[in-house]
Amino acid sequence: MPLNIDWQQILLHLLNFVILFAGLWLLLYKPVKKFMRERQAKYEKMDADAHKKSAEAEEKRAEYEKKLAAADAEIEEKRAAARKEMDAYEAMRKHASEEEAASVLASARESAAREKERAVADARSEIAGLVTSATEKLVLHESASEAYDEFLDAAERGEGEDGK
Amino acid sequence: MTKKQLGVFLGVVLPVIALLIVGIVFTNGLYERDATIQETMQDAILHEGDKISLFGLMVNPGLISAYIVTGVILLFAAAVRIFAIPRFKTVPGKFQLVIEGAVGMFDNMARTNSPHKNNFLGAYIFAAGAYIFIGTLFELVGVPWQTAAGMSVTLPAPLSDINGAIALGCLTYVFILVGGITSTRVRGLGRTLKEFSLPISMSFRLFGALLSGMLVTELVYYYLALSFVLPVVVGVLFTVMHALVQAYVLATLTALVYGEVTEPYHKKTKQPKQSRQQKQSQEVKV
C-alpha cells in the first residue's frame, strides 16, 4: 500500500482508541459529569427553594399588608364608634349634670327658703323674747330695787350675829 | 540577587556550559550517521526501516506510542476515579477545577454544536481530544525503543503514523454515521454519506499536521548546530501548539458534523404559488 498504509495496523489503532474511549468514558467522563450534574441539580434546587420561600414571604407580606389595612380600617371604625359613644356619653353626662345642678339649685333654694323662714321665725321669737324681757324689766323694775334693799338689810344682820 | 549570589551563580553556570560545549565538540566525531537527511525524513514518514515487533507482528513505532499513551491516560483516569473523584467538593479545588474544566468544555461543545442528540458525543470528543493532545505531547518525552533490526528509535507521536490518523478519521466518520442513522434514520445516513470526504480530510489533516512537527524536529536534531535553543522554540511551536490546535479542530469538526446529521427534519411548508394575474394586480397596487 502507498505511504505504508497497513489495514492490520489501522485495526490495531482502532482497537486502541475504542479501548481508550470506553475507559475514559467509564472512568473519568461519566463520573465527573454525574458529579457536575448532581451539583447543578443541588444548586437549582437551592435556587428553586429560595424562589419558593421568597414567593411565600412575598405572599405573607401581601397578606399581612392586607390584614394591616383591614385592621387600620377596623381601628378607624372603632375609633369613630368610640368617639360617637363618647359624644353621647358626654351629652348624657352634661344633661345629667345640668339636671343635678338644677335639682341642687332647687334644693338650695328650698333650703335657703327654709333657712330664711327659720331665721325669720327665730328672729321673731327672739324679738318677742326681747320685747317680753324688756317689758318684764320695765314692769319689774320697782320690785327689784326693793328686793335689793332687803338683801342689803339681810346682809347687815348677818354681820351683827357673827360679831356676838 | 546580591553580588555574591550572582558571582556564585555565574561561577557554576559558566564552567558547566563551557564543559558541555567542549564535550559536545569532542564527542561529535564518535557518532557516524547511518542515514542521510533524505533517508531520515523518509523513515519518519514511511517507517520502512524502523519496524517494531509487537507479539510477532511488525508494526510502526507510532502504534507502540499509541498503546503507551492509552495506557498512561487510562492509568491517570483510574487514579482520578479512585482517589480524586470521591473527594470532589461542591466548591472545587485547583485539580478538580482542571478536570471539571476539561470535561465541561467538551460537554459544552457537544451540547452547543449538537443540541438534539449528544449522549456519547461529548465523551467521544473528550477521548479524541485527550488522545490527540497527550499523544502529541508524548513526542516531547522521547521514549527510546528497540526496532526489530536491533536499532534504537525514539517513539513518535501516535498520530504521526498514517495508520493511526486514518483509524481516528474513519472511526470518527463511523461514529457520526451511527449517530445520524440512530437519530434520523435514512436521512441521517444520506447526510453522512454526503460528507464522504470527511474521513479522508480528517485523517490527512491530523497526519499532515503532526508529521510536519515531527519532520521539523527531526531536521533540527539532525544538525548539531541547530540543537541549541532552537528545539525549545520548535518544541513549543510544532508540538504544544499542534497538540492544542489539532485536538480542538478535530473535536469541533466532529461536534459540528454530528450536530448537522442528527438534526431532526422539519417539513417546509410550501407557500401556494401566486398566479401571474395576482402578481400583476399586487404590482399595480404598489
Image (spheres, rainbow, N blue to C red):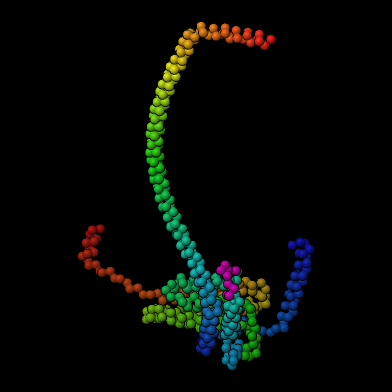
User: Looking at the picture, how far across and down is residue B203, in whole percent?
Assistant: 50, 80
Splitting the image into 4 quarters, where does residue A27 fall? bottom right
Q: Residue furthest front?
A: A164
Q: Position of residue B12 (x, y in %)?
A: 77, 70
Q: Residue furthest left?
A: B277
- Foreground of the two, B208 or B122: B122
Q: Is residue B215 visible?
A: no
Closer to the camera in the image, B198 or A130: A130
Residue depicted at x 57% and y 88%: B59
Describe residue B198's horizontal placement relative to residue B40 as left or right. left
Q: Which of B29 and A28 is in front in this view?
A: A28
Q: Position of residue B276 (x, y in %)?
A: 22, 66
- Residue, x 33% and y 73% (percent of image)? B267
Q: Write down the region rendered in magenta.
A: B85-93
Residue B49 coordinates in the image, percent (x, y): 60, 88
Picture quarter with the N terminus of chain B: bottom right
| x 38%, y 34%: residue | A95
Q: Position of B277 compared to A27: left or right? A: left
Magenta span: helix, strand or loop, mainly? Answer: loop
Left or right, residue B122 beside residue B270? right
Report if residue B87 lies within the magenta region: yes
Classify A138 as above or below B164: above
Q: Please count the marks in the image.
A: 0
Of all residues, the one furthest to the bottom in this rendering is B56
On the question of residue A142 being in view, the answer is: yes
What residue appears at the point 28 percent right and 69 percent down from the top-left corner? B271
Q: Is residue A49 magenta?
A: no
In the depicted view, which residue is nearer to us: B245 or A108? A108
Q: Where's the C terminus of chain B, which quadrant? A: bottom left
